[in-house]
């Protein structure tokens, strides 16, 4: 058996330190690799969740639009606005092909054009945005709208508190669910819709 000396003990400590350093480096590399793999998996999961949320939002938006569209012809007819043509997701572009505005549901007849904005949850900001859209429609009228009276409305599956009153004061039709379909909430006898010239 070899005799223990101070130099031998120091050498054992040095060798032990080297082994510990190598082990520490390997553990650090392994952890970095595991963290990188976990980050990649989390990014993939995050993308998938975001896509599913976006798809759900799109599905809910389409559901809301279908609920409004289903009976809108009868509702406006009862207001003396017969619907001769209806379009979904009407997009207008300028002369250079740049997007100007989109209308969720567009209703036409010989006298009127009605632009409806549909939201899952209707907020005051949505009303204001639709009023701004009406200005764009005046600047870039859609084909066949010249000389017709332009009306506007907003619809929501959920209408925020006071939003209906706000929208009506701005001259917009307000549509929201009512039993099996939607109804125009404005009072036929007292409400006068805002009119825009095309």
Image (cartoon, rainbow, N blue to C red):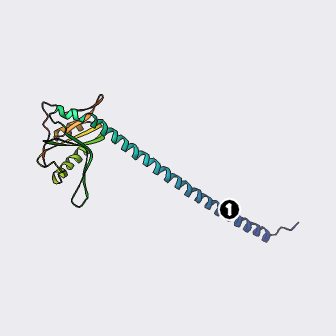
- Give the class, few, some or many, for how many residues have Cα within 10 Å of label 1's Cα (few <14, many ≥20): few
Measured as percent of width and height from the top left, residue 101 is found at 24, 52
Which residue: 18% across, 33% down? 77
Single out the residue that lies furthest toward the right: 1
Pick the front one: 162 or 13: 162
Q: As drawn, is 177 to the left or to the right of 195?
A: right
Q: Is residue 160 visible?
A: no
Placement of 192 over or under 4, stated as above or below:
above
Which residue: 20% across, 40% down? 167
Snapshot quadrant of residue 152 = top left
Pick the front one: 17 or 8: 17
Q: Which residue matches tag 1?
A: 23
Single out the residue that lies furthest toward the bottom: 7
- The quarter of the rendered structure image containing the N terminus is bottom right
Snapshot quadrant of residue 56 = top left
Measured as percent of width and height from the top left, residue 122 is found at 28, 40
Measured as percent of width and height from the top left, residue 70 is found at 28, 35
Secondary element at image label 1: helix
Q: Is residue 89 visible?
A: yes
Placement of 98 over or under 90, stated as above or below:
below
Q: As drawn, is 40 to the left or to the right of 90?
A: right
Pick the front one: 193 or 141: 141
Which residue: 22% across, 46% down? 130
């Amino acid at each position: 058996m070899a005799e223990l000396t101070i130099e031998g003990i120091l050498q054992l400590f040095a060798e032990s330190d080297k082994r510990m350093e190598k082990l520490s480096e390997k553990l650090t590399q392994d952890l970095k690799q595991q963290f990188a793999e976990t980050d990649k998996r989390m990014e993939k999961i995050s993308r998938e969740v975001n896509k599913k949320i976006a798809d759900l939002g799109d599905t809910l938006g389409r559901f809301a639009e279908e609920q409004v569209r289903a009976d809108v012809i009868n509702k406006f007819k009862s207001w003396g606005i017969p619907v001769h043509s209806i379009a979904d997701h009407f997009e207008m572009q300028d002369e250079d092909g740049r997007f100007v505005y989109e209308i969720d549901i567009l209703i036409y007849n010989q006298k009127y054009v009605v632009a409806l904005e549909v939201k899952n949850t209707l907020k005051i900001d949505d009303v204001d945005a639709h009023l701004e859209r009406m200005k764009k429609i005046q600047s870039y009228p859609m084909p066949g709208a010249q000389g017709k009276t332009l009306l506007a409305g907003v619809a929501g599956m959920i209408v925020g508190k006071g939003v209906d009153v706000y929208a009506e004061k701005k001259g917009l039709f307000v549509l929201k669910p009512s039993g099996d379909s939607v109804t125009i909430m404005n009072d036929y006898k007292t409400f006068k819709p805002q009119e825009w010239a095309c």
